């Protein structure tokens, strides 16, 4: 049996998340990655640079980020065991906790359902705009609900399943290296200019880092709500991302709603394929149902982490 680092991190995150008072006091570790990325992009992603040069500096940026994460994770892990001896795993679990987002994701999605249930579309748009990157000003009730459910499904992988996977595989260095990669992908890993070339390495590396976790997250959601299997197998490849379609298709099938479809970013409509196209329009109750599935799926990940700890 290995030390139960993962259960400690999961427990703390589920209990308190990342409290606002703590955020106001010290920010969040991911903010440090964002500042490094911002400096690199400002100085190295210049319009006058060639595509090859942008890709080169994008690779350098990613290497700097991952190196910082690995060094910091390894240093904290080593220091924890050096100071606390056999109890060092508790400190390592505490240092891993901020990389998880179980409670935060639930707390951010729930207000969308509550606002829609009250018929307050403006409040629902405001709430969903905090968790999605698409244009929200013109979304109707179904569009708002669809955006919230898609974000919940995708973030189940990015915010819980993938960090947990890398924590189990590579300890504290692994979970924070993953968060560095995922943050870089979120900020610069876009196909649009001016990030297409500079963010190429971040996007491709994030695809690799999420390859297994995305499939684990899709299967976990199906076990949490068995109605998603057929849509998962049929539609997971209909998403533009090689990974995001797995949890989204599982959730669409479980809820019997249509997800994805046409969506607007920065005023430009993207004609995305439908996932679970035979499903109905999403609404407030579907968000609530999705949150229930999400909680059950998180519980399954707890069991999985516990079994790994016990088996090893």
Image (tube, grey):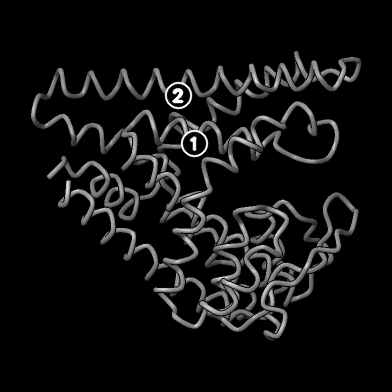
Image coords of residue 136 (percent x, y): 77, 60
Q: Are dots 1 and 2 in contact, CB under 8 Å?
A: yes
Q: Residue at x 52, y 46 (%)?
A: 210
Residue of label 2 = 69
Please identify the quarter of the rendering in which residue 248 is found.
bottom right
Q: Nearer the viewer, residue 133 or 222?
A: 222
Q: Residue at x 89, y 20 (%)?
A: 47
Q: Residue at x 64, y 40 (%)?
A: 186
Q: Nearer the viewer, residue 260 or 246?
A: 246
Which residue is most to the left?
86
The disc label shown at residue 179, or none: 1
Indicate whether 210 appears above or below 96. below
Judge the density around disc 1: few (<14), some (14-19), many (≥20) Cα neighbours within 10 Å.
Answer: many
The disc label shown at residue 63, or none: none
- The kind of secondary structure element at disc 2 is helix
290 left or right, relative to 123: left
Please identify the quarter of the rendering in which residue 1 is found.
top left
Q: Nearer the viewer, residue 130 or 75?
A: 75
């Amino acid at each position: 049996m290995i030390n139960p680092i993962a259960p400690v991190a999961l427990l703390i995150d589920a209990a308190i998340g990342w409290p606002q008072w703590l955020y106001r006091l010290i920010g969040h570790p991911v903010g440090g990655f964002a500042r490094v990325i911002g400096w690199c992009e400002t100085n190295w992603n210049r319009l006058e640079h060639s595509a090859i040069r942008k890709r080169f500096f994008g690779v350098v940026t990613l290497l700097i980020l991952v190196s910082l994460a690995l060094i910091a994770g390894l240093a904290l892990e080593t220091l924890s065991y050096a100071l606390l001896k056999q109890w060092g795993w508790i400190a390592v679990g505490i240092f891993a906790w901020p990389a998880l987002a179980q409670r935060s994701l639930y707390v951010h999605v729930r207000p969308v359902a509550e606002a829609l249930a009250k018929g307050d579309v403006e409040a629902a748009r405001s709430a969903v705009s905090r968790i999605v990157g698409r244009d929200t000003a013109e979304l109707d009730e179904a569009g708002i609900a669809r955006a919230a459910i898609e974000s919940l499904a995708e973030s189940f992988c990015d915010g819980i399943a993938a960090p947990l996977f890398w924590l189990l595989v590579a300890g504290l260095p692994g979970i924070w290296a993953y968060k560095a990669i995922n943050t870089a992908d979120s900020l610069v890993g876009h196909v649009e200019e001016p990030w297409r070339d500079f963010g190429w390495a971040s996007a491709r590396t994030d695809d690799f880092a999420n390859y297994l976790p995305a499939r684990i997250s899709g299967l976990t959601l199906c076990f949490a709500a068995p109605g998603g299997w057929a849509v998962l197998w049929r539609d997971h490849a209909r998403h533009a991302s090689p990974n995001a379609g797995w949890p989204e298709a599982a959730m669409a099938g479980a809820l019997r709603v249509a997800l994805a479809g046409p969506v607007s970013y920065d005023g430009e409509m993207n004609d995305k394929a439908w996932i679970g196209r035979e499903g109905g329009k999403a609404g407030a109750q579907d968000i609530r149902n999705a949150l229930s599935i999400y909680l059950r799926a998180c519980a399954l990940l707890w069991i999985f982490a516990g079994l790994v700890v016990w088996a090893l």
